[in-house]
Image: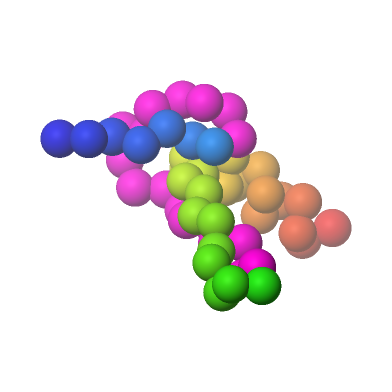
């Protein structure tokens, strides 16, 4: 089984976290980022401010 790593902290994801999709480029391609639960919680706290 392949486990992705968090694109923010670099830790291997041992449980489902979040996925962030970037905006499409001029060819409609998007970047996909894996986010661990801890980094997601940090992002969520920042968004509430």
Farthest residue to the left: give it.
Answer: 1
Q: Can residue 38 be seen in this view?
A: no
Judge whether 48 appears above or below 43 on screen. below
What secondary structure characterizes most of the magenta part?
loop
The reply to whether the magenta stretch includes residue 9 is yes
Judge whether 29 appears above or below 44 on screen. below
- Position of 25 with respect to 21 (left or right) is right
The residue that appears at 58% across and 72% down in the rendered structure is 27
Total numbered badges shown on the rendered structure: 0
- Position of 24 with respect to 16 (left or right) is right
Give the quarter of the figure containing the C terminus.
bottom right
Residue 20 in percent (x, y) is at 54, 57
The residue that appears at 67% across and 49% down in the rendered structure is 43
Quarter holding residue 25: bottom right
Camera-side residue of 4 and 38: 4
The reply to whether the magenta stretch includes residue 46 is no
Judge whether 31 appears above or below 10 on screen. below
Segment tinted magenta in the rendering: 8-25
Judge whether 10 appears above or below 4 on screen. above
The residue that appears at 55% across and 56% down in the rendered structure is 31
Camera-side residue of 15 and 28: 28
Farthest residue to the right: give it.
Answer: 49
Residue 30 in percent (x, y) is at 55, 64
Residue 41 in percent (x, y) is at 59, 46
Give the quarter of the figure containing the N terminus.
top left
The residue that appears at 31% across and 40% down in the rendered structure is 15
């Amino acid at each position: 089984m392949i486990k992705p790593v968090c694109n923010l902290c670099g830790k291997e994801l041992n449980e489902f976290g979040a996925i962030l999709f970037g905006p499409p480029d001029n060819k409609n391609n998007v970047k996909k980022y894996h986010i661990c639960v801890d980094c997601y919680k940090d992002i969520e706290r920042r968004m509430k401010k």
